[in-house]
Image (cartoon, rainbow, N blue to C red):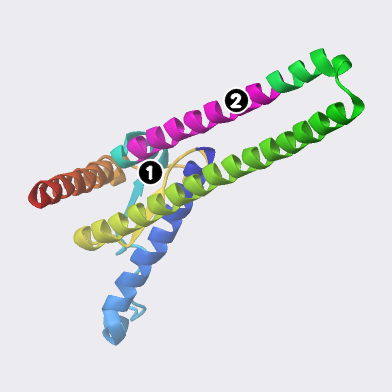
């Protein structure tokens, strides 16, 4: 989960670019006539807002659900790995206890079998690690897509030209509370997510 904050930061930066592009693309060639100096949108005319990324990560219901699902899957896979590892450890302990009663060929055969099982366990561990990495990457991409899409819509509806990220790692050192749209963005993201759940429930009921 440590990568989610970084991903959201990137999302917000991209969203700024999207809103910037949408504004000027919509202005067309006539934009050069706006303003007294004919340079188009000035810094004074730009409408700016900011969001607190840590609050979005904490309060976005979609992310809460997906994070809980990923953590549950992680625990399940870790338990499966521990069970396999413990089973192999028991076989090794049994071999060590009985090796003196085995012929050389029997001992060699068991050692080779245990060696294969150890190799398979390492491959299994690598497979689990890759699986979890893929799941996290998928979640990061879904988060990216959702936040970007919502900020694009929010910006169009509210005439925003820039949305900045405000947290200890950002270059924004001060911003008035009146520019803080975090609560509105979280509410909108959660409303959209709840609507998705309602739509899916209605669709499932209809099929039944």
The disc label shown at residue 67, or none: none
Of callouts 1 and 2, which one flags the residue occurring earlier in the amino acid sequence? Answer: 2
The foreground one among 95 and 194 is 95
Whether 150 is among the magenta residues is: no
Q: Position of residue 137 (x, y in %)?
A: 50, 50
The disc label shown at residue 175, or none: 1
Q: Secondary structure at mark 2?
A: helix
The foreground one among 75 and 103 is 103
Q: Position of residue 27 (x, y in %)?
A: 27, 78
Contact between labelled residues 2 and 1, with CB atoms less than 8 Å apart: no
Residue at 23% over, 44% down: 184
Q: Secondary structure at mark 1?
A: loop
Q: Position of residue 104 (x, y in %)?
A: 91, 27
Q: Which residue is mark 2?
A: 82
Residue at 24% over, 56% down: 154
Q: Position of residue 103 (x, y in %)?
A: 89, 23
Q: Is residue 200 left or right of residue 122?
A: left
Density class for disc 1 (Cα within 10 Å; few <14, some 14-19, many ≥20) is few
Most common secondary structure along the magenta stretch: helix
Residue at 35% over, 69% down: 42
Q: Which residues are magenta?
A: 63-89
């Amino acid at each position: 989960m440590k990568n989610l904050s970084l991903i959201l930061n990137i999302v917000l930066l991209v969203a700024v670019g999207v809103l910037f592009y949408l504004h000027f693309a919509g202005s067309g060639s006539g934009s050069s006539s706006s303003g007294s100096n004919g340079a188009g949108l000035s810094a004074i005319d730009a409408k700016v807002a900011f969001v607190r990324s840590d609050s979005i990560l904490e309060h976005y219901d979609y992310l809460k659900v997906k994070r809980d699902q990923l953590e549950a899957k992680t625990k399940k896979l870790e338990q499966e790995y521990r069970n396999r590892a413990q089973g192999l450890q028991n076989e090794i302990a049994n071999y060590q206890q009985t090796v003196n009663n085995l012929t050389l060929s029997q001992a060699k055969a068991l050692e080779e079998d245990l060696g294969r099982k150890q190799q398979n366990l390492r491959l299994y561990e690598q497979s689990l690690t890759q699986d979890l990495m893929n799941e996290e990457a998928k979640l990061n991409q879904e988060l990216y897509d959702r936040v970007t899409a919502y900020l694009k819509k929010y910006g169009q509806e509210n005439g925003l030209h820039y949305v900045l990220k405000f947290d200890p790692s950002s270059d924004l050192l001060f911003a008035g509370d009146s520019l803080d749209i975090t609560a509105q963005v979280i509410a909108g993201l959660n409303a959209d997510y709840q609507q998705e759940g309602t739509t899916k429930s209605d669709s499932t009921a209809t099929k039944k």
